[in-house]
Amino acid sequence: MEKWIDEAFERAAEKFARGAKLAARQGIIPYKSEGGHYVPSPFDGNSWWTGGFWPGIMWQLYHATGGKVYMDEALRAEEMLAHELMTFDLLNHDVGFMYLLSTGAHYRLTGDKTAHTNTMHAATLLAGRFNPAGFIRAWPQRERAGYAIIDCMMNLSLLYWASEQSGDPRFAKIARIHADTAIREFLREDGSSCHIVIFDPETGEALERPGGQGYCAGSSWSRGQAWALYGFTLSGINSGDSKYIDVARRCARYFIAHIREDGLTDSDFCQPKDEERIDNIAGACAACGLLDLADVVGGEEGEEYRAAALRLLRALYDLCADWSENTPGILQKCTASYHDDGAGRHVNILYGDYFFVEALCKLRGTDARLWMAR
Ligand code: GLY
């Protein structure tokens, strides 16, 4: 293993041991960092979709090191998230992100019964968002009954997990119906994906494909592409159906072909050439997907995916990782949305750090496998 990987991991573990104590003092679930402190989510309080990534970092580091400081902090954040299950109104399809990495991780790593119940509760809420017209509804607003988004490919892992746990195939069947719809309606010939599809909620007919968090309709939002790459890889692994792995390969080839010269990732692969807009979350997430895909396909093709993941991660480490004490976050130049929606542009955002840490754990053989059904 290359020396920088251990170095990056050690520095991340050290930074987040301090960060765990800071977040507890602040009494929040960190969304991003600014100056010397953490900042909570910009919208919807603790129901905002990113709440699981902070405890996810803590569980990955706990799994890799056994450090109690990480587990204590993961449990503190989990208490706040478990409360959101009861508030219900603001929750959406992103209960997968939120609870796989918090209560799901807690159960996976310790066998805690309450954490298991809470994770099954989240899976049941996600299954309840399924429209039998063929898709999982993303958001709760009345006028958005027909909206589905590519990000949901990551949330499907919660459904595969719930079927494994309960012996009830409904959850996994819903996941597969949604994944099949995503292949048909989100993926383009060239392997790129659109972000949003608006379906007729009565018939399931695809009506519109707006630009969402990307540059414009018809463009290619890089984080959406990373969700597709990693999400289809996970559907392949969790369902055992190689058709999803073949789709992930197409997504991977498109992503790899669009990595910047310097190894970083543009916020949208179709953005104007004179716009400097980078999203390092996309690069870190894609690296995780590429490493898992490499393991599944093996051989020369697998080596190619692994090399691309290493290129992405090395660029993040060399060019955009801040190890100083000026900030409690690591990856800089993270962009929530191409057209700034108030959630952050070219700043540190903690879910970028989550995927960076997860990728380092994969490379060091200690990944807690938080997206896996088994
Ligand atoms: N799931 C929303 C995002 O990636 O920003």
Image (cartoon, rainbow, N blue to C red):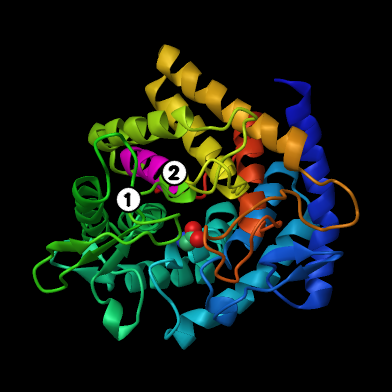
Residue at disc 1, secondary structure: loop
Question: Does the residue at mark 1 contact the one at mark 2 (Cβ under 8 Å)?
Answer: yes
Q: Amino acid at mark 1?
A: Gly
Q: Which residues are magenta?
A: 226-237
Residue 151 in the image: x percent, y percent? 40, 56
Q: Which residue is mark 2?
A: 270
Q: Amino acid at mark 2?
A: Cys
Q: Quick one: which residue is furthest to the right in this view?
A: 325
Mark 1–mark 2 distance (CA, rounded to whole Å) = 9 Å
Residue 52 in the image: x percent, y percent? 57, 64
| Up/down of 269 relative to 19, above or below | above
**Residue 113 in sight in this render:** yes
Residue 211 in the image: x percent, y percent? 37, 59
| Residue neighbourhood size for the residue with mark 1, other residues' Cα within 10 Å, grouped as few (<14), some (14–19), many (≥20) | some
Residue at disc 2, secondary structure: loop
Q: Which residue is mark 1?
A: 218
